[in-house]
Image: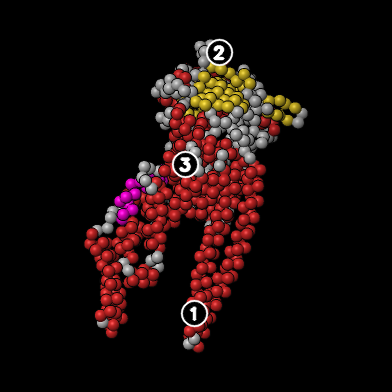
């Protein structure tokens, strides 16, 4: 697949035109609301002075007009908010295709004024809350950070969706996912790639709903909510049937009919006060649920209305085997919460409960929902999280100049899964228009890569690692083709010392390398990536140490790539190792400077540009 920048540029024009139209409508409606409110106030004041019935009617008419205008204006304002977020989403796609991480940051913080909130928005964009320094490859492969896979590919706006996508990046390589399951994910991703409008609508809707925090109140209520007690139901029914007394009094004793109305108010007030002990937990739960429930309902509505054909996506949309499904269940909860919204203000709560036992009705509706559907809620949330992780995986097919679905080794034999063959692989975090692609094959063997500083060695092994991680999430990869086994990925590249733990760089590297060697003893498929092994010690120890590591990693179920400048070690690997292949990068020197072609070539390079680079920066 290939990125289609024209689609998003044309989309931007449509969004801006619609945004301008609805913004004008919103301004006009605001003006009409003000006029109708002033007219209503003026008519009522005039009616009070003149004691004129027609003026009262006119005042009531303008109040009705004001209410209608408020409802219409609220709908238009929601469209403006949605289009504003949709414009940000569309601009983010353009930035991804252009590889512009600064623009992604600018979009993420647009409109935010407080410095603390800007910092939170950046952390969310970068996924820094998921960063695990001691992970097998997290730091080495730039999973999280300003210029990272997460900031490039994450389109999930819900807390649980972000967490699921981060988990896929971190842990898919050690999961027991089968080839068939990977193919199912790829099929789902393929259909998502064909629906960019859906992806943007979904993301903009989630942004409007501000789903950045877990729905803890909702989940807690769904888990522990219970039906209302029988005594509460009796009181609720009593508060309704007490009003039968009013028409009875009008028929039997008209002189005391008005007093019967007051009596009903008093009885319902007593019932309301007594009911606080029964209904408080339900009413309190309502305070934290409406927005998130409404947003989740909208998201499922978009999903159901898109008309997906992929079975995995359809099964996730259904959520569970419940007849109503996720959408029907959430719709019932949303209806109950809308009823609860009637008593959002203390004065309204008092008025409505004097008329009828509203709190009892709310508690009854919520309790019944919790008992019938509460256990299904985690399934609905998990389904959304999984769907959003698939949407993130689809990004590789939408933003890269060239991408392809990987093919996986069908066998479960560890020896056959130690395999990686990629054609025209490109690192996804490099500028898309200038990045150089390379083809790499390792098959139960080790590729030792040599070359001068800055020639592209480290970038190449990172590319192999990133493409493997993306493949294991079901995503496309930036390549012409890729065939690989299901392998654990482990790396040793960015080694950092620690004063706090009294750890030198060399010791830190030893720990990373020992982890790889330990994993090699598990007899499971492994892809290792080691950059400049044992750079922190003297040449003799480095050579001996590297040879020891290579012997431990020379197993049929292991493949890997290692970069080095240790030519003494390379010379000693030409004998005693039949599983090592040699590749290199080279450069050219001209009168104007040094140039790299960043193309991988078979063989060993003994070139060094260290002296040249030192002179270039004024050393020597």
Disc 3, SS: helix
Extreme-right residue of the structure? 591
Q: Residue at x 44, y 50 (%)?
A: 296
Point 31% across, 54% down: residue: 368
Single out the mark in the foreground, 2 or 3.
Answer: 3
Residue pictured at 44% horizontal, 51% vertical: 297
Q: Which mark is residue 57?
A: 1
268 left or right of 381?
A: left
Q: Over which residues does the magenta segment extend?
A: 367-383
Picture quadrant of residue 243: bottom left
Q: Residues within 10 Å of mark 2 (few under 14, many from 20)?
A: few
Numbered mark located on residue 387 in the image = 3
Say few, some or many: other residues with alpha carbon within 10 Å of mark 3 (under 14 / 14 to 19 / 20 or more): many
Q: Which mark is residue 574?
A: 2
Q: Secondary structure at mark 1?
A: helix
The answer to if 352 sits in the magenta stretch is: no
Chain-order first, disc 2 or disc 1: 1
Quadrant housing the N terminus: top right
Q: Position of residue 71 (x, y in %)?
A: 51, 65
Near-viewer residue (352 or 513): 352
Residue toward you, 600 or 286: 286
State left or right for residue 476 relative to residue 367. right
Mark in front: 2 vs 1: 1
| The one of 590 and 408 positioned closer to us in this rendering | 408
């Amino acid at each position: 697949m290939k990125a289609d920048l024209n689609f998003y540029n044309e989309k931007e024009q449509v969004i801006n035109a619609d945004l301008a139209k609805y913004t004008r409508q919103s301004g006009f409606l605001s003006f009409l609301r003000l006029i109708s409110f002033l007219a209503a106030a003026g008519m009522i004041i005039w009616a009070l002075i003149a004691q004129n019935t027609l003026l009262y009617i006119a005042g009531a008419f303008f109040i009705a007009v004001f209410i209608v205008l408020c409802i219409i204006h609220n709908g238009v304002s929601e469209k403006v908010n949605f289009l504003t977020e949709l414009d940000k989403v569309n601009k983010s796609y353009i930035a991804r295709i252009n590889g512009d991480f600064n623009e992604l940051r600018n979009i993420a913080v647009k409109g935010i004024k407080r410095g603390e909130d800007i910092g939170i928005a950046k952390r969310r964009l970068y996924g820094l809350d998921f960063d695990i320094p001691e992970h097998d490859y997290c730091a080495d492969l730039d999973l999280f950070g300003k210029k990272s896979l997460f900031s490039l590919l994450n389109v999930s706006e819900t807390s649980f969706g972000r967490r699921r996508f981060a988990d896929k990046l971190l842990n898919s390589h050690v999961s027991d996912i089968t080839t068939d399951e990977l193919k199912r994910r790829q099929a789902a991703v393929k259909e998502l790639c064909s629906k960019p409008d859906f992806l943007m609508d979904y993301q903009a809707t989630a942004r409007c709903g501000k789903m950045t925090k877990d729905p803890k109140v909702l989940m807690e209520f769904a888990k522990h909510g219970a039906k209302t007690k029988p005594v509460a139901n009796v009181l609720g029914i009593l508060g309704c049937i007490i009003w039968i007394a009013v028409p009875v009094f009008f028929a039997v004793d008209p002189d005391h009919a008005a007093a019967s109305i007051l009596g009903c108010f008093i009885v319902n007030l007593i019932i309301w006060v007594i009911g606080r002990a029964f209904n408080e937990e339900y009413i309190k739960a309502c305070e934290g649920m409406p927005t998130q429930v409404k947003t989740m309902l909208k998201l499922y509505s978009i999903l159901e209305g898109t008309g997906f054909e992929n079975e995995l996506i359809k099964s996730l949309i259904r959520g569970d085997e419940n007849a109503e499904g996720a959408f029907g269940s959430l719709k019932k909860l949303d209806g109950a919460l809308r009823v609860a919204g009637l008593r959002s203000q203390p004065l309204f709560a008092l008025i409505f409960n004097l008329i009828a036992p509203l709190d009892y009705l709310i508690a009854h509706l919520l309790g019944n929902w919790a008992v019938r559907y509460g256990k299904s809620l985690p399934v609905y949330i998990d389904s959304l999280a999984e769907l959003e992780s698939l949407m993130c995986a689809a990004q590789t097919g939408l933003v890269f100049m060239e991408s392809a679905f990987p093919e996986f080794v069908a066998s479960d034999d560890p020896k056959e899964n130690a395999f990686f063959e990629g054609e025209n692989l490109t690192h996804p975090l490099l500028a898309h228009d200038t990045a150089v692609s390379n083809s790499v094959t390792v098959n139960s063997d080790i590729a030792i890569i040599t070359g001068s500083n800055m020639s592209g060695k480290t970038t190449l092994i990172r590319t192999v690692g990133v493409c493997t991680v993306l493949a294991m999430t079901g995503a496309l990869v930036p390549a012409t083709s890729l065939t690989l086994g299901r392998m654990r990925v482990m790396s040793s590249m960015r080694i950092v010392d620690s004063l706090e733990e009294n750890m030198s760089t060399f010791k830190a590297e030893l720990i990373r390398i020992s982890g790889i060697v330990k994993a090699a003893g598990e007899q499971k498929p492994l892809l290792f990536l080691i950059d400049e092994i044992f750079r922190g010690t003297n040449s003799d120890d480095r050579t001996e140490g590297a040879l020891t590591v290579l012997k431990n990693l020379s197993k049929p179920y292991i493949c890997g790539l290692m970069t080095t400048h240790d030519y003494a070690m390379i010379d000693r690997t030409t004998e005693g190792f039949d599983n090592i292949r040699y590749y290199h990068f080279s450069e050219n020197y001209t009168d104007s400077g040094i140039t790299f072609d960043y193309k991988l070539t078979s063989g060993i390079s003994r070139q060094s540009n260290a002296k040249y680079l030192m002179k270039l920066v004024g050393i020597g």
